[in-house]
Image (cartoon, rainbow, N blue to C red):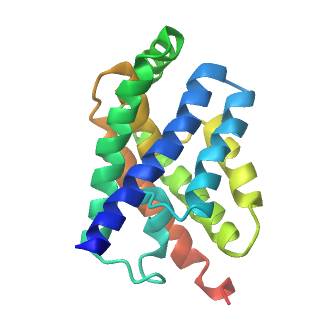
Amino acid sequence: MKNITMLINKSIGASLLIGLGDYALLKLGNPIGPFIFAFGLLGVCYMKQNLFTGKCGFLIEDKINVFELLTILIFNLLAGYLFGVLFSTTDAEIVENAILKVASWDLSVAFFVKSILCGVIMYIAVYMYRKNTPLGIIFGIPLFILCGFQHCIANIITMGVARCFDISILICILGNFIGSIMMYYLSRDIKD
């Protein structure tokens, strides 16, 4: 029971950290917001929290089972949405920005590809962190945001701020997973 409690707590913690980054992004916009957002993933990695998009590509390497990954995803999504709702009570400007952002999402091939590309960047960022450099996070997070790539946990937080739900989250989850796993397999030969 202790392991599942820790798994859930670290999943909620990851959502809070990504939520802080998303709050900064919604408040500050480009070009500062994407760089401040990197604080969220730095916190997740250094504090050893459980973020779905940071775990996908490491399923095999870290021996993560499907139950654990689904638990991480579910609690990232639930906590992320609730943190978004909480954030919405603090600032009308971020709510307006979140509503506009959610309205721009759709079920297109482009949205799916942007989700895959975010998964690729997330895998590289975490992989580089595991090789003792935060540069993948410091540059990768602003890269995916400035390019308009889609991150499922950031998106669910934005939905919470907007107090709405958009089905595009399912495409985003799948795309992030595929991008991360794809990058794992494409980089297997270069690993130590």
Q: Residue at x 63, y 87 (%)?
A: 189
Is residue 155 in sight in this rendering?
Answer: yes
117 vs 59, nearest the viewer = 59
Query: Where is residue 48 shown, x and y percent of the image?
Result: 53, 65
Query: Where is residue 105 shown, x and y percent of the image?
Result: 41, 28
**Please, which residue is most extreme toward the front here?**
2
Q: Residue 70's quadrant in the figure? A: bottom left
Q: Residue at x 35, y 26 (%)?
A: 85
Count of picture labels: 0
**Please, which residue is most extreme toward the bottom here?**
192
**In the image, is 71 to the left or to the right of 109?**
left
Q: Residue at x 30, y 77 (%)?
A: 65
Is residue 181 in sight in this rendering?
Answer: no
Query: Where is residue 142 shown, x and y percent of the image?
Result: 69, 42
Relative to residue 174, is residue 104 depicted above or below? above
Relative to residue 164, is residue 122 depicted above or below? below
**In the image, is 59 to the left or to the right of 148?**
left
93 vs 100, nearest the viewer = 93
Quadrant containing the C terminus is bottom right
Q: Residue 89's quadrant in the figure? A: top left
Quadrant containing the N terminus is bottom left
Q: Residue 68's quadrant in the figure? A: bottom left
Relative to residue 177, is residue 154 depicted above or below? above
Q: Residue at x 55, y 56 (%)?
A: 44
Query: Where is residue 120 shown, x and y percent of the image?
Result: 56, 59
